[in-house]
Image (spheres, rainbow, N blue to C red):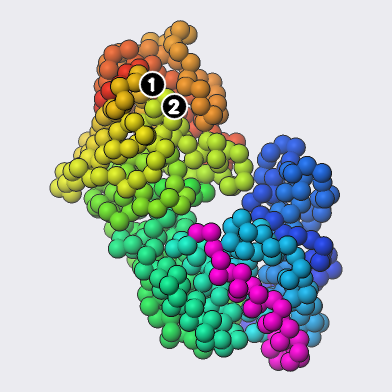
Amino acid sequence: MPDVANWVKAEKARVDAWIARNFERADLVGGWSQAYIDPKTGQALQWTPQSPEPPNGNTEAEKTVKAAWVALGRDYNIVQMQTAARIYKLTGETKYALWAAQQLDLYASNYGTWPIRTSEGRSSMYMQGLDEAVVSFAMIDTVRLLETYASGTRYQTWRDKLFMPMATNLKSTSAPMSNIALWHNAAIAAIAMRYKDTALLDYAHNGSQGLKAVLAYALTADNFWIEGTFAYNNYVLDGLSKLLTQAGVEGYGARFATEREQALRLLLAAFDYRFDNNTLPNPNDSRAAQALIAQPAHWWLFRFAPTYWGLDKANKWRTWESLLDVPATVPATEPVIPPAMTRNFPTLNQAVLRAGNWQAYVHYGQSNGNHVQEELTTFELHEGKTPLAYDPGTVDYGLPQHKNYFQRGAANNVPLINGVGQDIWAKGVVKLFSAAESRLVVEQAKYQSDVSVTRGYRVTSAGFVEQTDIQVKSGLNKRLGVVFNTTCDIVLGNGTAATASVAPLPKVNAMGYWSKTKMSNGQPNWQATLSCGANRYQLSVTGPANQRIYLSKAPNTPLPSERNALYYDVDGTTARFETEIRKLN
């Protein structure tokens, strides 16, 4: 197979180049890869195998970026280590086995001397245990591939000095019953399977906080991961696929039949939420907009839970995985995915409303505090393939815009009290849900400590209507408003009057990221026009007298792109705003 030979040649060339450059050494202490941020500009840096080693630095920011550089290089080194072992197994060229074994020797020699970090679990190789869990699969697979090459003493040293201490560290997690706990347990199980450690495998699989317990708790009846994001759904699938792969090659495949079925449920859950343009809603703090078909996720499972898209990717993409397990033939025709239907997903506190070509997604509550943002009661809205309001996700967690803007209410489509969204996450109460009317009414009784919010949403074949009721229980006067974010162009119309005398925006950090703000007075009934590509829509707002309207440019992803933020508010202790959106052309 000439294409395989050429592909292997390219793999060897990449590994050879890294062997010549590899900087991994004992004095390098790994940090957090997402903190690879320029200490001078605050902008994210892009790591490549050619990225120069930063100086040790004197400031905390300089030390952090150095540790992040180490972490990213360590990730890359471990991938090349596994690839070298694969090349050895395929070709018999011992120079690759020698180098891969030397990397394991280095990690075994230093695992017990590198400082243990405890801020996020326990880790010696990185800042947090999760990163160690992720790389452990490539590391333990390298051991498997080198089993006939390494001497008994060397092989035993890897076990005693590296993998058993790593398994002990991974028993500690800062986030039990979460995606992190799943990764930790899957990694422990992989180590246990390699060394045929029955007690350790039982701990990872059947323990009180082991894989079975985590999946029973976190895989909801709505077939969605409890942390409530499609990105973390896929992240869990990545961990499960690595577990299933290791189980297969180690002869434990039958033990994890239930986990295989659970992985398929997670994979297909996205179809219940799809918009007509084959994108997905983006609740909580995922990065970037989400595609309906997450090709990597389908590919990860092509051996265990094959779908059309997984097999298609596996047949087109030359990988070591497809050499190990030749993928089945792709079906002749791609499945037709039906449109989403109006449904409430009570275990996730999310809903889809659909009528005609109009579809809204509502995130009305939260069952788990992990990855929550100030976005409860937010909505996303599409008309056919046209997005009127969608969540662009956040940026790298290490960037200040993540915590200070994209996680905040101003970046979502929510009520704001003095410029702030909900400060207490809660499940919320569904007061009314009608599938026949595509209608939903929800209450967040403690949106803030002294503020309750009730929002109603309805989709018809003619458009979308949303009603917001805000009540300050303490009776204190506050700024009560609503924010609407969109990539559509916005032009204010009837019932608005531009002015320079309106009070400035609330003094919150998030609104400090807005720019080019235009201020207007608003009558109780006012309108704006949304231009979304070739389509135009009328946005009509009914609310109290003396409304203030602010139209600003706001951050979007990827940075430095922008979108439009429309914010309107009044002073008071109660307020009702009703917003209707209909198509004009």
Question: Crowdedness of circle 2 by 10 Å Cα count: few (<14), some, many (20+)?
Answer: many
Above or below — where is 98 with respect to 561?
below
Q: Nearer the viewer, residue 474 or 228?
A: 474
Q: Residue at x 44, y 63 (%)?
A: 177
Dot 2 corresponds to which residue?
A: 419
Quadrant occupied by the N terminus: bottom right
Say the numbered circle drawn on residue 40. Answer: none
Residue 434 placement (x, y as % from top left): 17, 46
Residue 101 in view, yes or no = yes
Above or below — where is 534 with respect to 67?
above
Residue 200 placement (x, y as % from top left): 54, 81
Dot 1 corresponds to which residue?
A: 479
Residue 163: in magenta span: yes
Q: Nearer the viewer, residue 163 or 582?
A: 163
Which region is colored magenta?
A: 146-175
Mark count: 2
Instruction: Compare marks 1 and 2 and give the one earlier in the sequence.
Output: 2
Please, what is the three-letter code of the amino acid marked with disc 1? Arg
Residue 524 placement (x, y as % from top left): 27, 16
Question: Which type of secondary structure does the marked residue at label 2 adopt?
Answer: loop
Q: Is residue 83 left or right of residue 271?
A: right
Q: Main secondary structure of the magenta part?
A: helix
Q: Residue at x 73, y 62 (%)?
A: 115
Q: Residue at x 82, y 44 (%)?
A: 58
Residue 389: in magenta span: no
Above or below — where is 467 with respect to 301?
above
Residue 557 placement (x, y as % from top left): 54, 41
Please, what is the three-letter code of the amino acid marked with disc 2? Gly
In contact (CB < 8 Å): disc 1 and disc 2: yes
Q: Nearer the viewer, residue 464 or 251?
A: 251
Question: Crowdedness of circle 1 by 10 Å Cα count: few (<14), some, many (20+)?
Answer: some
